[in-house]
Image (spheres, grey):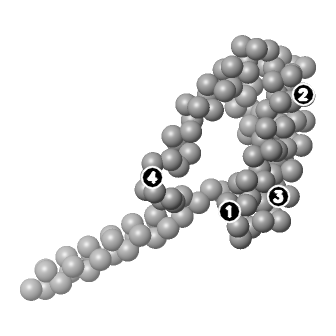
Amino acid sequence: MKKAMILSVIMLAICASYSFAQRGQGQREKLEPEEMAKRQTTQMKESLDLTEEQLTKVEALNLKYAEKMETLRDEAKADREATRNAMKPIREEKDAELKALLTTEQYEKLVTLRKDSQPKRGKGRGRGKS
């Protein structure tokens, strides 16, 4: 009887620790625009083989749009759908600038990489709209 009680307490503790560990999952870490731009630039440098000139321009471009997105997120915190809709033209504007900056091959590779990463960004995890 005593062993069963101890075993129950241990199992309860394990279950509780798992629930606390999972609480933070699904929430992205909040990055400052500078850090977000730096990450994006690093990823693009590695995957697209950017020249030094492109690297400088892409870094400035990523920072410019990271700041725009941050401002937009701050203004529309409560309404995610409105935020998403407002971000679409900003993303399109950034893509147009990137397309002008990158070679055709680099831009096509960027588009392919984005498509490949979409399933990793939360689609099909059973959350959101069905």
How far across and down, in percent of the image, does residue 99 sit?
A: 81, 24
Q: Tell me the tag on residue 56.
A: 2
Decide which of 94, 33 is in the foreground and name it: 94
Q: CA distance from mark 4 to mark 3?
A: 26 Å
Give the crowd class for mark 2: few <14, some 14-19, many >=20 residues within 10 Å.
few
- Tell me the residue at 66%/57% (across/down): 29
Q: Secondary structure at mark 2?
A: helix
Amino acid type at mark 4: Arg
Decide which of tag 4 and tag 3 comes sooner along the chain: 3
Amino acid type at mark 1: Arg
Give the crowd class for mark 4: few <14, some 14-19, many >=20 residues within 10 Å.
few
Query: Is residue 33 visible to us here?
Result: no
Q: CA distance from mark 3 to mark 2?
A: 25 Å
How far across and down, in percent of the image, does residue 64 sit?
A: 89, 43
> Which residue carries the number 1 mark?
80
Amino acid type at mark 3: Leu
Mark 3 or mark 2: which is in front? 3
Q: Is residue 85 above or below residue 77?
A: above
> Which residue carries the number 4 mark?
125
Decide which of tag 2 and tag 1 comes sooner along the chain: 2
- Horizontal side of 70 relative to 3 (left or right) equals right
Amino acid type at mark 2: Thr
> Which residue carries the number 3 mark?
72
Q: CA distance from mark 4 to mark 2?
A: 37 Å
